[in-house]
Image (cartoon, rainbow, N blue to C red):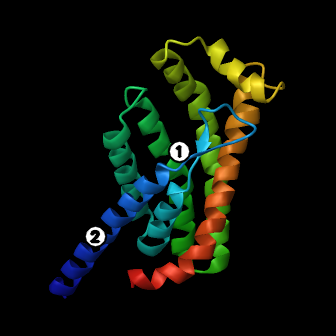
Amino acid sequence: MYSRDKKLNVKHMIQIAMLGAVATVLMLFELPLWFAPGFYEIDASEVAVLIGTFAMGPMAGAIIELIKILLNFVLNGTVTAGVGEVANFIIGCGLIIPAGIIYRQKKSRKSAIIGMAVGTLVMTIIGSALNGLVLLPAYSKAFNMPMEALVGMGTAVNPAITDVKTLVMFAVAPFNLLKGIAVSAITMLLYKKISPIFK
């Protein structure tokens, strides 16, 4: 029994490390969005994290998320003295942990969809709050740029953006909603095909 459990633990550790590396690679391919300033770019790294979460549980998902953030920090460095990386970890966990907990209760397609929908809403709320209160001020300080200039970048793509509140409302919140929906859709397409590898 001990030997079997040890083998499972080693197997999970390898899978977690591999998915963390895949997520890091996916994080390097970012796409700008038409409704948000250029510093908001979407990537598919959460797909690898969600797949790991569904296969091994929310704790494994959080570890994969952490590996992704740390590897990206090593490869690309930081412009926010680590504040952005911590916030990205929290925002990512806002998606994967609710999705993983709900899916773990009953492993079905329906619970996966419900979990990802709840996770997307949680991520949007957390992401909006962290951007408005932490990330945008951190970027402003890191680049020695007044908040008005960051808001102005939003105004350039959407005239309805006139202050931090509307930047969060019309750029940050839709960004997180779109990311959650896109990541969830890709995960649903891939998970059943990939899941046998984890068994």
Q: State whether residue 118 appears in this view.
A: no
Closest to the observer, 154 or 88? 154
Disc 2: CA contacts within 10 A as few (<14), some (14-19) or many (>=20): few
Work out which quarter of the rendered image holds the C terminus and state it: bottom left
Of the residues under marks 2 and 1, which one precedes in the sequence? 2
> Dots 2 and 1: beta carbons under 8 Å?
no
Residue 4 located left or right of residue 197: left
Disc 1: CA contacts within 10 A as few (<14), some (14-19) or many (>=20): many
Q: Position of residue 104 (x, y in %)?
A: 51, 73
Q: State whether residue 128 appears in this view.
A: yes
Q: Quadrant of residue 25?
A: bottom left
- Which residue sits at x=36%, y=59%? 21
When the figure is inspected, residue 141 is found, relative to residue 59, above or below; the finding is above
Q: CA gap, disc 2 to disc 1? A: 25 Å
Residue 114 located left or right of residue 134: right
- Give, as a three-letter code, the residue at label 2: Ile
Instruction: Say what secondary structure mark 1 lies in.
Output: helix
| Label 2 vs label 1, nearer the camera | 2
Residue with the mark numbered 1: 91
Q: Position of residue 187 (x, y in %)?
A: 58, 68
Tally of marks: 2
Q: Position of residue 79 (x, y in %)?
A: 42, 27
- Give, as a three-letter code, the residue at label 1: Ile
When the figure is inspected, residue 130 is found, relative to residue 199, above or below; the finding is above
Q: Quadrant of residue 77?
A: top left
Closest to the observer, 104 or 39? 39
- Which residue sits at x=67%, y=76%? 110
Q: Which mark is residue 14?
A: 2
Q: Position of residue 92 (x, y in %)?
A: 51, 49
- Which residue sits at x=34%, y=45%? 70
